[in-house]
Image (spheres, rainbow, N blue to C red):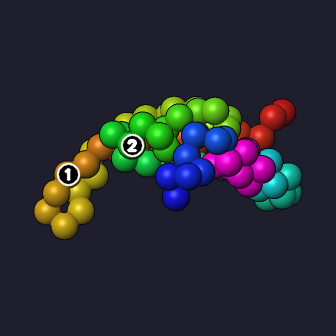
Amino acid sequence: PPAFAGRGYATEMLRLVCAHLLDLPDVTRVCADTEAGHTASRRVMEKAGPTWRRDEIEFRDGRSSTITHYALDRPT
């Protein structure tokens, strides 16, 4: 809801989810993607730790959209 926008809740949740997943023994990378034009989602990912990896054009239902891929690797 808009009442919670901009308060950092999504960033903190994503940060916690990534940390949890990377603590699992078989997980070495967490990946996420969003539409390139969704700047709020991109900011959340960048603040939480995942970094931009690539953009890709995807076709769905006869339409194309640019998808931005992010990933966070387990520290070595």
What's the residue at 29%, 43% (across, down)? 66
Q: Nearer the viewer, mark 1 or mark 2?
A: 2
What's the residue at 25%, 48% (across, down)? 65
Q: Against 59, is 36 above or below?
A: above
**Where is residue 60 shown, x and y percent of the image?**
24, 62
Label 1 neighbour load within 10 Å: few <14, some 14-19, many 20+: few
Magenta residues? 9-18
Question: What kind of residue is marked 2?
Answer: His
Residue 64, numbered label: 1
**Where is residue 15 shown, x and y percent of the image?**
73, 45
* Left or right of 17 on screen, residue 30: left
**Where is residue 11 shown, x and y percent of the image?**
66, 43
Residue 10 sits inside the magenta stretch: yes
* Left or right of 20 on screen, residue 14: left
Residue 19 sits inside the magenta stretch: no
Residue 38, numbered label: 2
Q: Of helix, strand and loop, which one carries label 1?
A: strand
Q: Against 72, is 25 above or below?
A: below
* Main secondary structure type of the part rendered in magenta: helix
Question: What kind of residue is marked 1?
Answer: Ser
What's the residue at 23%, 57% (across, down)? 59
Q: Of helix, strand and loop, which one carries label 2?
A: loop
* Left or right of 71 on screen, residue 76: right
